[in-house]
Image: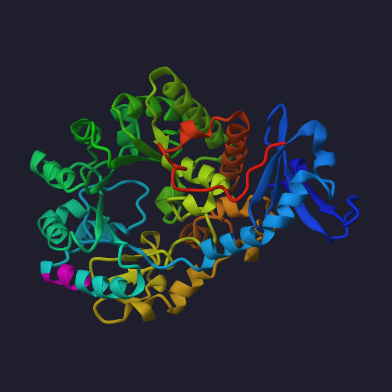
């Protein structure tokens, strides 16, 4: 957190159950979650947590308390689970760019303008060659019953849709496919093709009205695309496997509640309120201040709960849901940005239209993080190159002030590409430290009030067991 001294205290408990600051014993941190009745107790190293009534803090941290007894019984499991999540996951997904081109010129894009304007499409021969290379690799590294994911990503993948669609049909038994798109190039046949094959679709829309959405997302002639994207969303009504990303900037942060209401009215099942990634200088010009953004962000989350109460229909803000899951069930999180090391180069990699590989799409504009070429180098060698290892070895333990933060495993100090571009050093904090702090406090308040289910996808816990849960 930005300033732990304001709200959090280190508590060390000796074997006699007395408190003293020697560094021996259990190292818990107390977090004021701004709840009238509860505080959170967190072991930063294992992500163990408990909610404790404020008036009973001391007695519940005594050596013989139920909390300490159960913590001691579970400490090895906590440590092992967190270690596996951080260091033992296998590569299982690829962000695949079938083109360098884009029909839009968004203010915050992390791909250099020259590529988006003058880049090339990947040929069908090369796409199929890359897919066969990936298929061979994943056949050897993943369980037989697990399909790796291929997310056609951008630039704008629909600019190469003919080969993209042929690839989906040719390799439908080998990969689970998704398409992340700006949503402006679909016709009815395209949507029928994708939905009939249950392909995951991600769209982008930054506002609830055109004069907000079109500020940051527009074509090369400066014309906005709000109406076209809304038309696509309306056509996807009832389709379960799509989502809408709203990138949050200074231009739209004060409209987040309106945007949530708009998405909910369109029956969008999942959305993301993504703080703008500040990898490129254009994005940094429209970066909100943390404290200002947090206010609007949490109000929008409040509105998702109110809408669910009013209508019985959820709209899940997926990136916040991931923060909430990092507390409730760390291994059940669906995004690997909010953990350190992040998923870049570890759980997924990105392939550009010329076959070059990067730990994540955010690095595509940073040539020094190219790990090799899919057509020339073995994937096993690529993921162990210096650029990939630099990302894979980025840990909160090596970042100041993250190493002493109570929520370091709920946040993960994202994003390494952002940190590198902004600060010239990958082992520094990213752009939205305080926003994560406020999200974690908010999440704990929801848990204390028993509201967490309203913010998560249905049946999120149907195939999970809690390793530990205690509210005192």
- Tell which of 152 and 452 is nearer to you: 452
Residue 365 is drawn in which quadrant? bottom left
Q: Is residue 126 magenta?
A: yes
Coordinates of residue 22 in the picture (x, y in percent): 88, 60
- Taking the image as shown, residue 306 lies to the left or right of residue 265, namely right
- Taking the image as shown, residue 8 lies to the left or right of residue 150, namely right
Coordinates of residue 308 in the picture (x, y in percent): 43, 24
Magenta residues span 125-130
Q: Is residue 364 magenta?
A: no
Total numbered badges shown on the rendered structure: 0
Residue occupying image coordinates x 47% and y 43% = 461
Residue 223 is drawn in which quadrant? top left
Residue occupying image coordinates x 12% and y 71% = 125
Q: In which quadrant will I find the C terminus?
A: top right
Q: Main secondary structure of the magenta part?
A: helix
Q: Is 75 rendered above or below residue 234?
A: below
Q: Is 463 rendered above or below residue 100?
A: above
Residue occupying image coordinates x 55% and y 40% = 289
Q: Is 277 rendered above or below residue 288?
A: below
Can the viewer see residue 27 in this picture? Answer: yes
Q: Residue furthest top?
A: 310
Residue occupying image coordinates x 19% and y 41% = 184
Coordinates of residue 464 in the picture (x, y in percent): 48, 48
Q: Is 352 rendered above or below residue 389?
A: above
Can the viewer see residue 286 in this picture? Answer: no
- Taking the image as shown, residue 229 lies to the left or right of residue 288, namely left
């Amino acid at each position: 957190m930005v300033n732990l001294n304001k709200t959090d205290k280190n508590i060390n408990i000796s074997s006699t159950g007395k408190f003293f600051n020697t560094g021996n014993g259990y190292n818990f941190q107390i977090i004021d979650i701004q709840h009238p009745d509860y505080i959170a107790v967190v072991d930063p190293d294992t992500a163990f947590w408990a909610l404790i009534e404020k008036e009973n803090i001391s007695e519940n941290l005594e050596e013989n308390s139920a909390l300490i007894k159960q913590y001691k019984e579970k400490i090895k499991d906590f440590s092992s689970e967190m270690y596996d999540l951080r260091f033992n996951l296998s590569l299982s997904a690829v962000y695949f760019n079938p083109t360098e081109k884009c029909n839009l010129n968004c203010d915050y894009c992390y791909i250099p303008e020259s590529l988006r304007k003058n880049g090339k499409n990947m040929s069908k021969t090369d796409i199929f060659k890359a897919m066969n290379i990936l298929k061979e690799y994943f056949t050897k590294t993943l369980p037989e019953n697990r399909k790796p994911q291929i997310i056609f990503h951008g630039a704008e993948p629909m600019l190469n849709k003919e080969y993209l669609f042929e690839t989906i049909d040719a390799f439908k038994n080998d990969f689970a496919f998704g398409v992340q798109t700006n949503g402006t190039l679909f016709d009815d046949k395209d949507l029928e093709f994708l939905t009939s094959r249950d392909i995951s679709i991600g769209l982008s829309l930054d506002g609830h009205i055109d004069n907000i959405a079109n500020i940051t997302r527009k074509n090369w002639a400066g014309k906005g695309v709000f109406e076209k994207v809304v038309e696509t969303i309306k056509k996807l009504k009832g389709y379960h496997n799509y989502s809408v990303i709203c990138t949050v900037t200074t231009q739209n942060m004060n409209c987040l509640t309106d945007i949530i209401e708009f998405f909910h009215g369109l029956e969008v099942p999942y959305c993301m309120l993504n703080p703008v990634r500040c990898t490129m200088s254009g994005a940094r010009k429209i970066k909100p201040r943390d404290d200002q953004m947090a206010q609007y962000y949490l109000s929008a989350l409040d509105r998702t709960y109110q809408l669910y109460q009013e209508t019985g229909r959820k709209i899940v803000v997926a990136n916040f849901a991931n923060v909430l899951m990092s507390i409730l069930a760390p291994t059940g999180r669906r995004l690997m940005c909010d953990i350190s090391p992040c998923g870049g180069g570890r759980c997924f990699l990105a392939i550009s239209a010329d076959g070059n590989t990067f730990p994540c799409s955010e690095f595509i504009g940073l040539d020094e993080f190219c790990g090799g070429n899919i057509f020339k180098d073995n994937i096993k060698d690529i993921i162990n190159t210096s650029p990939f290892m630099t990302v894979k070895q980025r840990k909160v333990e090596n970042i100041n002030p993250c190493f002493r933060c109570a929520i370091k495993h709920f946040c993960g100090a994202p994003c390494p590409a952002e940190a590198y571009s902004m600060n010239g050093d990958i082992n520094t904090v990213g752009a939205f430290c305080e926003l994560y702090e406020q999200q974690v406090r908010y999440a704990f308040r929801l848990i204390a009030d028993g509201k967490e289910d309203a913010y998560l996808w249905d049946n999120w816990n149907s195939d999970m067991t809690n390793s530990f849960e205690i509210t005192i």
